[in-house]
Amino acid sequence: MPNGKSLAYVHLHRNITNEIRLYWFQNNSIIYSTRWLEHKSGGNNINITSIDDGNIPPLSNLNINFFEYKSLAPEGGEFLRQNSIVSLIATFEAYLAIVYIRAIYISPETMQESKTQLLVKDIASSICGDNPWLSFAGLVATKILWNMPLSDMIYKISSVVKFSANATSQPLIDELVVFSSLRNAIVHNSRRVTPDLNKKWRSRFVDVDKAISTESRDVLRLSTLCLRVAELIDNRFIVTIIKDKDGYLLSKELFVRYGLVNGKIREIVNSELNIKINSTDLDIWMAKWRRDEIVHDDYIFSESIFTYIAKKWDL
């Protein structure tokens, strides 16, 4: 990523990685447990709770015979893949929402052409917290993005960060949108093919109302698409909105939370965000942070992102 990475992208990459690891952990657990039970049962159709400590919770909660367990394993794998697809799309949508909220917070002019109407009571509620403007930005983003199909969300965020798809990037976006139709069918149509999914992905899902069948490669492809499309958006997000603000924010957190010095801060920021901070600029920032009362008011990220970075760097 030539322009660096935003904290929003770092957050997304970490969550996508966790989703993929969780998928393989659970998928492989089904495979290994089936092999282990077949070995321990000698291939006989005995109740699996009679094997080793199988009569102790939580193992005893699955009180079935081995043959039934083995026959259910493929269906369990199918449900697992579908759930992973749902989670990956939700994770990508969360990234878009974070980008939009941060864009509104940093550059309110991004709302100049918005015709969204807000209730006074909602505005009043949003500005009662410790950071009224951040809360208001969240209210606006939620109101605008709520119930938008993924294609419209991507278009909206693209307009904010001034990203225009080309012949190379548009097919990636189109493919991601097709996966969102698969997600919708899983969530809203009891895991059965919808007319929309049939129309957009006819080569895979020929019969409407037929049970959806997926493969591990679908989960992997979707995770790749989420990151690649996010990279495209993030490049423009950095240039048009973020600039040096995420470098400043991460530097401040590293200084205030962990008391790190100039060189170490620049090393971590450069590694995590792929940007270089001028040593003199950082000295000026640190002098300000020493002098002024520090208010953590310019980020919307959960504590987990900073905890993740701290753990990664053994702080």
Image: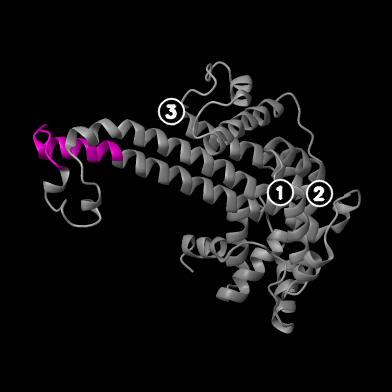
List x then y, in percent, for residue 97: 69, 51
The reply to whether residue 243 is in sight is no
Please tell me how crowded label 1 is: few (under 14), some (14-19), or many (20+) other residues with Cα within 10 Å. Answer: few
Q: Nearer the viewer, mark 3 or mark 1?
A: 1
Real-space Cα separation, disc 2 to disc 3, in angstroms: 38 Å
Q: Earlier in the sequence, mark 1 or mark 2?
A: 1
Label 3: state its secondary structure. Answer: loop
Residue closest to the eye, 270 or 113: 113
Which residue is labeled 3 in the image?
215
* Residue position for label 2: 240
Alpha-carbon span between mark 1 and mark 2: 24 Å
In this figure, which colouring scheme has been used for the structure?
Answer: one colour
- Can residue 7 be spotted in the picture? yes
For the point 35% across and 37% down, the residue is 76
Q: CA distance from mark 3 to mark 1?
A: 30 Å
Q: Are marks 2 and 3 in contact (CB under 8 Å)?
A: no
Q: Earlier in the sequence, mark 2 or mark 3?
A: 3
Most common SS among magenta residues: helix
Query: Magenta region: which residues?
Result: 30-47
Residue type at mark 2? Thr
Residue 248 in the image: state x and y as whole percent.
71, 64
In-image side of 28 versus 275 (left or right)? left
| Type of the residue with mark 1 | Trp
Q: Specify the quadrant of the image occupied by residue 174.
A: top right
Residue 99 among those drawn in magenta = no
Task: Single out the mark in the foreground, 1 or 2.
Answer: 1
Assess disc 3: are there few (<14), some (14-19) or many (≥20) residues with their C-alpha within 10 Å of its C-alpha: few
Earlier sequence position, callout 3 versus callout 1: 1
Give the structural element (helix, strand or loop) at label 1. Answer: loop
Reading the image, the residue beneath label 1 is 146
Give the SS element for disc 2.
helix
- Would you place residue 40 above or below residue 249 in this image? above
